[in-house]
Image: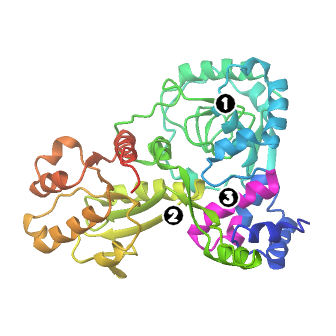
Amino acid sequence: MFPTLPKVFKSYGLPADVRTLLLLRKAMDKGLVKTLGDIYVILKSIVVKDPKKIGPYTRAYYDYFLSIEINPGERLDEAIERSSTFEKWLENFELNDRDRADWTMDDKINRFLDEVHITSYDIQKVLDGKKLFEEDDPRLKDEGGGGMEDAERRKLEKAADYLGIDLEELLERMEQIAKEQMDRHEGGSHWIGRFGISPYGNGGAAFGGIRVGGSGGGKMARAVIDDPRYFPVDMDARLRDDNVDAALAALKGVIEESAIEELDVNKTIKDGLERGGLFLPEMKDVTNEKMQILLLIDNGGYSMDPHIHSVTKLFKKMKTRFAHDMETFYFHNTIYKQVYSDERRTKGMTIDRLCDYDPNYMVFIVGDAAMAPYELNQQSYHDWMQIKEKFKKIAWLNPDSMRAWSYSETCIFLGKMFPMYTLTPKGIEDAVREMNKIRRM
């Protein structure tokens, strides 16, 4: 089983050996691996011990399991588009989806990725979606009370298979239900919502359904609709659980890869000696992932408490979805000589050490910037200036409405020091757009 996997993964600098295969086999024996997406998740937990290895792991995974080699400086979608694997998949896709000839290449690549990363969600039972569909009453009135419980953490133990129902029939039924729906819903099999087995919504377990909003959940959808009639997202609303995915889409703008060439000293010397003293410069590609992020969060007061969960959830989603390097630090109101690597603020790191990070890191500061004027003293000002001078791509994300900024003297002061944006999907999008205008040094 996968005998050459360790060799391929080692070529990407990953610690893979026979124990890796044994652990993967053990997971398969326990029924934890049912799809290719499951292999991606399980193997990542076995192989990746350092977040910096997520990028190499992703490239190794695509190379070994899909024969898609991502060249230095090449984006994933470019590698997929030129691959024979995608070409063969596309032939089948075009054959079975003739009515989708107007799909863009990006749509098709996203669909391909959805299918590649489908996971089993620990599903123990797959229900007959056609039977559920026939027994469901599209005229059901919405009595409200859909609830916003923490359903995302609930394990989905069953799924529904709607692949046997014509897509147009599903769309027609969804139109009927949308007319009756008055509230957000989570769980269940009827309404347009999240985390259930309904064929319409996101984050649930419905094979062959229609994804409405969200980032894909179990990657099972047959079609994707982004229509505010069905799943409205207020881009100007404060960041919260139900619009995190919209913010995630905005953050995608920072994901790029580039490659630079540098002199390979060892190879130059080795080859030169073999040529009898004729030393010719040998170059090598060094891939740099542009998405390097420092996240500084003010978690020291009641005013910030409601926002910490959504912020950490957003950036955690980035870590699980995209290959990048991110470090999170905390402070209380403002910084004094150090930031902290833990939420309780017991493990300090000096500002000098923080500024040892690559200057190309993107820095997101999250806080209301409101405090007593005496707190923003000369030492704190010096620390903020040190960060500003080191990192050119900085954005301050403020959870308070823009109208409230003018009532705080310290907020006004920090807003002049750093570009300040609202902690909303639109604010994050604007911040990323401005960051991307600043070229790497």
The amino acid sitting under disc 3 is: Thr
Q: Earlier in the sequence, mark 1 or mark 3?
A: 3
Q: Dot 3: within a 10 Å radius of its alpha carbon, few (fewer than 14), some, or many (20 or more) residues?
A: some
Is residue 245 something that shows in the picture? yes
**Whole-percent x and y of residue 261?**
57, 60
In the rendering, which numbered label is found on residue 82? none
The amino acid sitting under disc 1 is: Met
| The N terminus: image quadrant | bottom right
In the rendering, which numbered label is found on residue 105? 1
In the rendering, which numbered label is found on residue 325? 2
The amino acid sitting under disc 2 is: Asp
Which of the 4 image quadrants contains residue 60? bottom right
Q: Dot 2: within a 10 Å radius of its alpha carbon, few (fewer than 14), some, or many (20 or more) residues?
A: some
The magenta stretch spans residue 51: yes
| The C terminus: image quadrant | bottom left
Q: Earlier in the sequence, mark 2 or mark 1?
A: 1
The Cα atoms of the two marked residues, 3 and 2, are separated by 13 Å
Question: Which residue is drawn at the image coordinates 66% and 73% (left, top)?
Answer: 279
- Residue with the mark numbered 3: 58
Q: Dot 1: within a 10 Å radius of its alpha carbon, few (fewer than 14), some, or many (20 or more) residues?
A: few
88 left or right of 43? right
Q: Element at badge 1?
A: helix
Q: Element at badge 3?
A: helix
Q: Element at badge 2?
A: strand
Q: Nearer the viewer, residue 283 or 331?
A: 283
Question: Which residue is drawn at the image coordinates 51% and 63% (left, top)?
Answer: 325
64 left or right of 235? right
Q: Start and end of the magenta stretch?
A: 44-67
Q: Earlier in the sequence, mark 3 or mark 2?
A: 3
Question: Which residue is drawn at the image coordinates 31% and 59% (left, top)?
Answer: 365
Q: Are marks 3 and 2 in contact (CB under 8 Å)?
A: no
**Whole-percent x and y of residue 121?**
71, 53
